[in-house]
Amino acid sequence: MPDIVFDTLQLQQGYNPRANVQDAFGYITSLTIAGQKFTSDISAQASMVSFTSRVVAVMRYFKWAGGLTDPMQLKANFSTTNRNVLYKMLHGMVPNTNVTFGFVIFYFDQSSSVFYQAMAGSAPNGTTPLSGQIAKQGKQKLLLTLPSQLAGRAVQSPPNWEFDLTVMPGKTAQHVSYAYAPGQLIMKNWGVTVA
């Protein structure tokens, strides 16, 4: 099964969507880590896909090998408020590795010259969160980082900060919608129900 990779998600298009720009973009629509809910404080208004919402972060990268137990890797930028919450969490004691998150990715189809929803977590519109655990490297290192001490430079305003998160699926079967072209929706499973 081929990997599902969106490695060219554009921050500028996510923060300031323009119909005449054909760059892919995506959002983390909700995020809770270890019981800490992150604020949906970025206004996303992408009229070309009829998406208007307040979101937690603008995505710059997504990768999933597509298997039931494969992790999802997300890279995104969020507000100073959310950066400070995560910074405090990472420098304290993370009580558990539970994660719930929703996301949606939009892609431009060259043949029909339209944007379409290429991927969403758990519900066709990405509003029902997926659940999982922060992935680890070895026994101790959590794959949750703030890779830079500097604000993002691709978008100057509002101030935004990079963070990377890799999530293993939880102990329940969940669904992810994936479309490889407009109208070509596939519901894929993520996670396995453990009795």
Image (tube, rainbow, N blue to C red):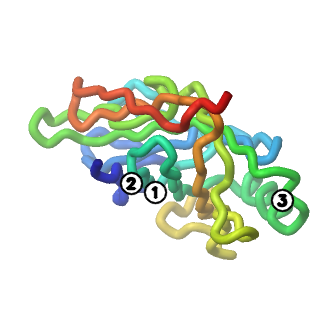
At which x and y percent is residue 130? 59, 34
At which x and y percent is residue 113? 15, 36
| Left or right relative to 169: residue 4 | left
User: What amino acid is found at the position of numbered circle 2 in the picture?
Assistant: Leu
Mark 2 neighbour density, 10 Å: few (under 14) some (14–19) many (20 or more): many
Seen from the viewer's position, the closer of residues 91 and 168 is: 168
Q: The C terminus is located in which quarter? A: top right
Of tags 2 and 3, which is closer to the observer? 3
In this figure, which residue is indicated by the disc labeled 1? Answer: 60
Seen from the viewer's position, the closer of residues 139 and 23 is: 139
Farthest residue toward the left? 111
Q: Secondary structure at mark 3?
A: helix
Count every numbered label the image shows and give the total: 3
Residue at 83% from the left image edge and 59% from the top image edge: 89
Residue at 67% from the left image edge and 54% from the top image edge: 134
Q: Name the image quarter holding residue 110.
A: top left
As measured in the structure, the alpha-carbon distance from the residue carrying label 2 to the one carrying label 3 is 27 Å
As measured in the structure, the alpha-carbon distance from the residue carrying label 3 to the one carrying label 1 is 22 Å
Q: Are marks 1 and 2 in contact (CB under 8 Å)?
A: yes
As drawn, 136 above or below 32: below
In this figure, which residue is indicated by the disc labeled 3? Answer: 89
Residue at 50% from the left image edge and 34% from the top image edge: 121
In this figure, which residue is indicated by the disc labeled 2? Answer: 9
Q: Secondary structure at mark 2?
A: loop
Mark 3 neighbour density, 10 Å: few (under 14) some (14–19) many (20 or more): some
